[in-house]
Image (cartoon, rainbow, N blue to C red):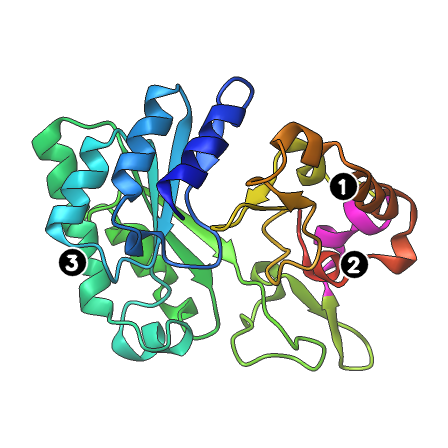
């Protein structure tokens, strides 16, 4: 994202927003201006969050992030052996990710920072034998907090090799006929009560200024408009935005595809 696009976003949201998340379907640390953007958002009084796979989390970047005033950083590591890590983080390097966590811890201590360093672990079949070990050792790895998260999987109807063996830790449950569906415990509030908090509470803005309804619109199919030629207020209350909200509230049998694999 270019700095001028970010400045336009910040100018329009700083009076009403409380949180700014600097990530969406990509690796935010590839943007060398990220710490500067975070510092600007912090100065505007916003709570700031970054989520990273830590592959680009060098000692210098850790220092820059902590000094920016970043409120919270999520480091995603989904396996603690080379085999379990590679099952989901294809092409990633486990040692580099763990090293990044240590850099963050060092920067936090050196700068007397209150940054929350959150280790996030997807619950997968390939790492379920490590869950207890992770709970015991996450602070030694450099994190201040640990969060386990269920995994969103694609092509789940006939099962998936990454689904945990215990359905309690999966977003999907097995039907009598052997197929799988989004677990009723996750889906009933949307499909039965037709609620979706996210469509009213915020939005996603892409690197080129497209305003998207939520983080599940990964392919930008429901863009409400572009911030470079419209105001965010006009886009957020546009006819296109309200049509999608009306559809999700009133047409539970004709939901957009992105809603059918959503737990929010």
Distance in Å between CA atoms under marks 2 and 1: 13 Å
Mark 3 secondary-structure assignment: helix
Mark 1 secondary-structure assignment: helix
Sooner in the amino-acid sequence: mark 3 or mark 2? 3
The spot of residue 85 in percent (x, y) is 33, 72
Disc 1 vs disc 3: which is toward the camera? Answer: 1
Q: Which residue is mark 3?
A: 99
The spot of residue 262 in percent (x, y) is 68, 55
User: In the displayed structure, would residue 29 be above or below residue 124?
Assistant: above
Sooner in the amino-acid sequence: mark 1 or mark 3? 3
Residue range in magenta is 182-193
Q: Which residue is mark 1?
A: 241
Task: Name the one closer to the observer, 73 or 222.
Answer: 222
Q: Which residue is mark 2?
A: 256
The spot of residue 184 in percent (x, y) is 76, 56
Disc 3 vs disc 2: which is toward the camera? Answer: 2
Can residue 141 be seen from the camera position used here?
no
């Amino acid at each position: 994202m270019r700095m001028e696009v970010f400045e336009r976003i910040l100018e329009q949201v700083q009076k009403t927003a409380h949180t700014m998340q600097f990530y969406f379907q990509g690796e935010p640390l590839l943007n060398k201006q990220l710490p500067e953007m975070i510092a600007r958002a912090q100065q505007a009084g916003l709570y700031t969050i970054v989520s990273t796979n830590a592959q680009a989390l060098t000692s210098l970047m850790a220092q820059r992030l902590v000094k920016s005033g970043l409120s919270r950083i999520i480091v995603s590591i989904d396996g603690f052996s080379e085999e379990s890590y590679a099952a989901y983080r294809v092409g990633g390097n486990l040692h580099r990710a763990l090293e990044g966590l240590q850099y963050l811890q060092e920067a936090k201590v050196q700068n007397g920072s209150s940054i929350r360093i959150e280790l996030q672990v997807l619950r997968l079949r390939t790492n379920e034998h490590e869950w207890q070990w992770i709970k015991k050792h996450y602070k030694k790895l450099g994190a201040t907090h640990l969060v386990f998260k269920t995994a969103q999987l694609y092509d789940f109807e006939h099962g998936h090799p990454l689904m945990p063996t215990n359905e309690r830790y999966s977003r999907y449950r097995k039907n009598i006929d052997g197929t799988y569906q989004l677990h009723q415990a996750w889906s009933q509030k949307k499909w039965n009560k037709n609620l979706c908090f996210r469509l009213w509470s915020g939005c996603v803005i892409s690197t080129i200024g497209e305003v998207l309804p939520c983080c599940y619109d990964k392919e930008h199919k429901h863009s409400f408009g572009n911030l470079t030629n419209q105001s965010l207020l006009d886009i957020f209350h546009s006819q296109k935005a309200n049509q999608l909200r009306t559809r999700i509230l009133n047409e539970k049998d004709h939901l957009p595809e992105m809603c059918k694999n959503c737990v929010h």
